[in-house]
Image (cartoon, helix red, strand yellow):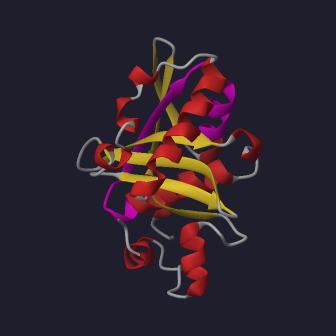
Amino acid sequence: MVSLADERRADPNLEASNEAQAVRRGTGKRLSIVPLRPEDQREAKSLILAGMEEHWGVLDESKNPDLNDIAASYADGVFLIAWQQGEMVGTGAFRPVSDKTVEIVRMSVKKEKRRQGIGGEILKALCRRAFQRGFTRAILETTATWEEAVAFYQAFGFEITHQTGGNLYFAMDLQRWAAD
């Protein structure tokens, strides 16, 4: 379990107060983005799979073994949960692929909460944390035909590096987070 002290080290703006405790639990009025707690795993898995089923029209849970034990699957990375007024509204994660590069994965925002900036805030938090941990590059992939996702990542600053089959691959230099 991640302590509030760990969260403050990752986000120096988070204060040790009753407000910070409310933010950690997602009961405050503003969006809060915090590390996954073990008790949040089932709900996070459901949120992600619902988004995949919505996009693909079908769901094959066997293709997502990392979601069976999220904490273990992302133990060497970061898995974040976005909360708003006590409701889980989004997820995002990264895992190291080398000493200097992380892969962004599991970006998902609840359907009725999309286009409100939540995905961008999750992605900012992931990039900021990756840079703070010493990583200098982030990569990710998405389906080439998923136009909304492609536009989202490009607007955020990711650049397409290549396409293989039906997937687009992106990269971004994390130095832009040095000032944060």
Residue 136 picture location, percent across and down: 36, 53
Left or right, 14 with respect to 151, comes to: left
Q: How many marks?
A: 0
Residue 161 picture location, percent across and down: 46, 29
Residue 73 picture location, percent across and down: 31, 43
Above or below, comparing residue 13 to residue 118 in the picture: below
Q: Report the front residue among 165 and 24.
A: 24
Quarter holding residue 146: top right
Q: Is residue 132 magenta?
A: yes
Left or right, 79 with respect to 21, comes to: left
Above or below, comparing residue 17 to residue 31 in the picture: below
Query: Residue shown at 51%/14% (left/top)?
Result: 166
Quarter holding residue 174: bottom left
Q: Is residue 99 magenta?
A: no
Q: Assign the N terminus to one quadrant of the image.
A: bottom left
Q: Report the front residue among 78 and 45.
A: 45
Q: Which residues are magenta?
A: 131-154
Residue placed furthest toward the bottom? 17
Residue 43 picture location, percent across and down: 53, 46
Query: Residue shown at 58%/45% (left/top)?
Result: 157
Q: Report the front residue among 12 and 58.
A: 58
Q: Kindly tell me whether residue 146 is visible in this rendering.
A: no
Quarter holding residue 83: bottom right
